[in-house]
Image: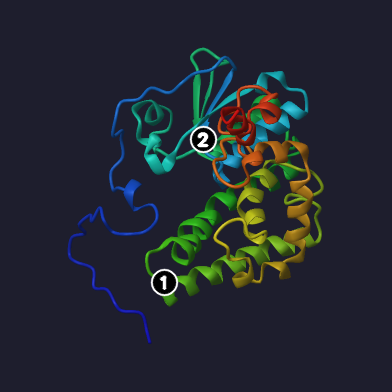
């Protein structure tokens, strides 16, 4: 049986109850829905985020900078609960008028600088601390090629494949097939690139890896959409090899925990304000203290 057809009206009308997992927070207009200022901690960098693939990019980068000894990269990570609409608070909209996580304020300069969009955050921090972005023109350009590849490709993975395969209220063959084909093509692009390179942009670990790993690494490890078998993810052997290698980095292990509110309690660090939080403030510790 073919999918039922849809004839668009002459003028589209918004139906707030259009179904789907995120229907309650999707709307066709921008701007704040309520007044709420953002908290500000003691560190130079203030991050407002959630541990989605886009959020993980920023926390991995900050942890990698701290791993290299950059004290100026100390940060407070505040939890933004997107399913509850925190991103539409007036304070958040001032930092990111697009109301998407992650968003960041750099208070080490006066006036403070706002940085939004995950790729912009990675590039900003790479240039600020002169790390994870090669200075050689050819290598720098290759890194940026792949950074922007991810910016353009991931919406097909998340908003396309992920939505229709995992989140849409009804399953339809045409959009699932359309976006499955594109995601498998993207995985093949990565697999071919990684066949001759240790990391995405060559032999150096860069912001290109930090941008791509949270999306495509999670995909092949069945951590998003539960689609690894459907996509035959194990056949992209070079992507799997790279995914496993990046996952072993200490900063990556820490970064993926920050602002996480699901999974094993020991992997959830709702907020991060100090390096000791990874040992003392994970959710298993907090809930254990509360139960005593």
Viewer-side residue, 229 vs 69 = 229
Q: Secondary structure at mark 2?
A: strand
- Image quadrant assignment for residue 287: top right
Query: Of marks 1 and 2, which one's residue comes earlier in the chain?
Result: 2
Answer above or below: position of 9 versus 42.
below
Frontmost residue, 258 versus 148 = 258
- Tag of residue 213: none
The residue under the point 72% across, 40% down is 253
- Other-residue count near label 2 (Cα within 10 Å), few / some / many at <14 / 14–19 / ≥20: many
> The N terminus appears in which quarter of the rendering?
bottom left
- Say which residue label 2 marks: 49
Residue 27 appearing in the image: yes
Q: Tell me what residue is drawn at x 72 percent, y 70 percent.
A: 235
Give the number of callouts.
Answer: 2
The residue most toward the left is 10
Question: Callout 1: 10 Å neighbours few (<14), some, many (20+)?
Answer: some
- Mark 1, residue position: 171
Q: Looking at the image, which residue is at 66% across and 50% down?
A: 213
In the rendered image, which quarter is residue 139 located in?
top right
| Residue at the image position 34 percent from the left and 53 percent from the top | 23
From mark 1 to mark 2, how far is it between C-alphas?
30 Å
Residue 229, percent from left and from top? 63, 70
Q: How far across and how far down the image is residue 29, in percent? A: 28, 43
Q: Are marks 1 and 2 in contact (CB under 8 Å)?
A: no
Q: Is residue 260 above or below residue 218?
A: above
User: In the image as oriented, which residue stretches furthest toward the front?
Assistant: 292
Residue 110, position as x, y percentages in the image? 52, 12
Element under disc 1: loop
Whether residue 126 can be seen here = no
Q: Is residue 287 above or below residue 219?
A: above
């Amino acid at each position: 049986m073919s999918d039922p057809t849809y004839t668009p009206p002459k003028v589209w009308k918004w139906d707030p109850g259009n179904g789907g997992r995120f229907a309650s927070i999707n709307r066709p207009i921008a701007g704040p829905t309520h007044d709420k200022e953002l908290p500000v901690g003691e560190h130079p960098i203030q991050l407002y985020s959630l541990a989605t693939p886009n959020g993980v990019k920023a926390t991995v980068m900050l942890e990698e900078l701290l791993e290299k000894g950059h004290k100026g990269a100390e940060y407070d990570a505040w939890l933004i609960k997107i399913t509850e609409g925190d991103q539409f608070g007036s304070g958040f909209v001032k930092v990111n008028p697009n109301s998407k996580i992650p968003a960041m304020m750099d208070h080490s300069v006066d006036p403070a600088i706002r940085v939004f969009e995950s790729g912009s955050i990675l590039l900003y921090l790479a240039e600020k601390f002169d790390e994870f972005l090669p200075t050689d023109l050819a290598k720098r350009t290759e890194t940026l090629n792949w950074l922007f590849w991810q910016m353009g490709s991931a919406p097909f993975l998340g908003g396309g494949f992920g939505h229709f395969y995992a989140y849409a209220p009804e399953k339809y063959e045409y959009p699932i097939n359309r976006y499955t084909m594109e995601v498998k093509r993207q995985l093949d692009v990565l697999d071919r690139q990684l066949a001759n390179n240790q990391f995405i942009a060559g032999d150096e670990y860069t912001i290109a890896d930090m941008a791509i790993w949270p999306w495509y690494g999670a995909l092949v490890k069945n951590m998003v959409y539960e689609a690894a078998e459907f996509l035959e993810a194990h056949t992209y052997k070079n992507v799997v090899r790279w995914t496993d290698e990046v996952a072993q980095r200490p900063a990556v292990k820490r970064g993926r925990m920050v602002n996480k509110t699901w999974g094993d309690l020991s992997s959830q660090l709702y907020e991060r304000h100090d390096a000791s939080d990874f040992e003392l403030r994970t959710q298993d510790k907090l809930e254990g203290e509360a139960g005593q």
